Image: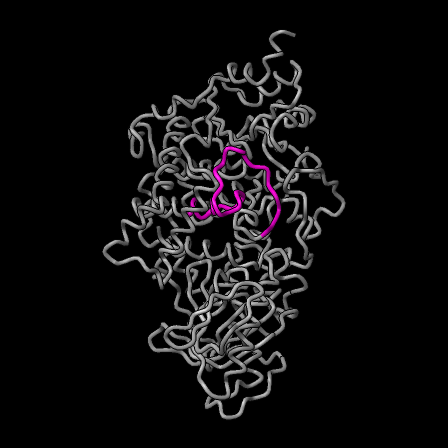
Amino acid sequence: MWWGGRGHSFNIAPQKDNPELGLSAPKSIQGSGMPEPRRNQLGSCLTSGCLSGEQILAWAPGIRKGLEPELPGTLICTNLRVTFQPCGWQRSQDTPLSSEYDFALVNIGQIEAVSGLSRVQLLRPGSLLKFIPEEILIHGRDFRLLRVGFEAGGLKPQAFQVTMAIVKAKAQSSQGQQYAGIILSKAGQSSASRNPPIPLLETSEDWETERKKQGARDWRVSTVNERFDLATSLSRYFWVPKRTLDSEVRRTFGHFHQSRGPRLSWHHPAGSDLLRSGGFCTASDPNKEDIRAVESMLQAGHSDVVLVDTMDELPSLADVQLAHSKLRTLCQPDSSAAEDKWLSVLEGTRWLDYIRSCLRKASDITVLVTSRVRSVVLQEHSDRDFNGLLSSLVQLLSAPEARTLLGFQSLVQREWVAAGHPFLTRFGETTASEEVCTSLPTFQFPSSQAPVFLLFLDCVWQLLQQFPAEFEFSEFFLLALHDSVRVPDTLTFLRDTPWERGKQSGQSNSYTKVYTPGYCQLPAGDSINPQLSVWNWSLRYSNEQRLQFHNPGYDPESCPDSWLPRQQMGLLAPTISGLQDELAHLQELLRKWTPRINNS
């Protein structure tokens, strides 16, 4: 658990390089005792010409509390974010999209108004503030807290107005609509025009380059989903066995949940292949030819095939959501947990238990992949959550390249973004209904909400702490990636599927969309910057900050071939006995899937 304390936040030095935006500021309030923000001061809260559709809804002078020393400045609410602008501070044009003073509306989890020592009101959508606040507390979903105090006297109307503006703006916002109509200025576009440091896997050339890099000679790039008419949740391109025709791919994938059939996730240098697949559709009606095609794709040219039930011994989505909610409550600055009870309360969240379960299973699968040449297939009903988590962890444990800064970003782009992890739904920013297993327990949260990606990042952080010399990136980078999930500047974490990202950026206007249950509605707003990626770190982090992404203790020569060489296969798990109960022989599984075939 690594983000609760926020003790590793970046120190952003004030920079003065922004011209005036020309935004109209409210008239000054007489008798406030505080200087009225000048027009260029208000304008500098937004980069010059950068976010042309952003509008200031309300503002009020105040003092940011909880810091030493306390900062006087201005609390500003726009239609996109809440920002506290310290007196004399101006936003850097080099990092136009965010700063430590910004809270995107979608990042706001809870708003509290305070008056005196006893009057506290939790402001929900539609709430009416019952008093003039002396303080406002904004709790971020990323564990940050913005605490601003207002002076008495003539500022009371402004304090009331800015508080209610924040509540209303938050209620009206949704992550899918956040930046509709917002475009970068010419200065911002020139900054953002630099290509991201990694391929975004949006072209067949990108996939072919990655295939060659992995040395997967028995695989090829399939274009069967190029028009998203096979599955909208899949990427346009993916890897299939070299001898498998696209017609067979189309027919075979139709027998899997949401048409997410078996495809290559990673090729081990020693020859093994790690595949991922959705669950079998029990209602499908395969013939013998279909069965042979499924068998061929699962075997992937190997005589030894292991199918792993991904969800066995792992938490459900509802379990993850409940644990994370308890963790967030515990890590808030105003947590009521006593200091001497904090660790026991942390244990009670079960968040660390779930991290342990994921790491244990990933290490077991790593042994399966590295111990002998075989095909290992990860099978999850949706193929969009824990398959990505386990596949990513296995590659981190086995491939030194995945533990480099660029390699890790490529891994996330391939196994999470391109593979169709439903970021928007899992973080609870949409109302889209998703088909889930009926066996999932129901708590106070919708069963589709669960920060699986944050669970993965915490798993990575645990490995980084145990083996710091093995990772080129630092915990500062993990923290930046964690925070980026809640900052809707790009399409990377702003949509659930590759089809939605392509539709949003205009890449798939000529493509035919097919129905995929639960993920067929494109959220509103079609003016997102298509060229921006979360990997364009220069838009939000200075050069000095990006230098902190690198781990100074990294030793690339510490284990050049594999982190888990065969003579040290028990580094994290001495045996694979824990998997024996969940492994199924291919023929047995296929017979259970289609018992009628045996009698035909």
- Looking at this rendering, what residue extends furthest in the bottom direction? 31
Q: Main secondary structure of the magenta part?
A: loop
Tally of numbered tags: 0
Identified at 66% across, 44% down, the residue is 499
Identified at 50% across, 85% down, the residue is 155
- Residue 276 in percent (x, y) is at 52, 31
Rendered view: 172 above or below 223? below
Magenta stretch containing residue 209, yes or no?
no
- Residue 240 in percent (x, y) is at 59, 29
Q: What quarter of the picture does the C terminus occupy? A: top right
Viewer-side residue, 333 vs 498: 333
Identified at 63% across, 82% down, the residue is 24
- Residue 457 in percent (x, y) is at 42, 47
Rendered view: 96 above or below 29? above
- Residue 249 in percent (x, y) is at 65, 26
Magenta stretch containing residue 444, yes or no?
yes
Asked if residue 220 lies left or right of residue 571, the reply is right
- Please identify the quarter of the rendering in which residue 227 is found: top right
Viewer-side residue, 8 vs 74: 74
Asked if residue 274 lies left or right of residue 48, the reply is left
The segment highlighted magenta reads 430-457
Viewer-side residue, 191 vs 130: 130
- Looking at this rendering, what residue extends furthest in the right direction? 510
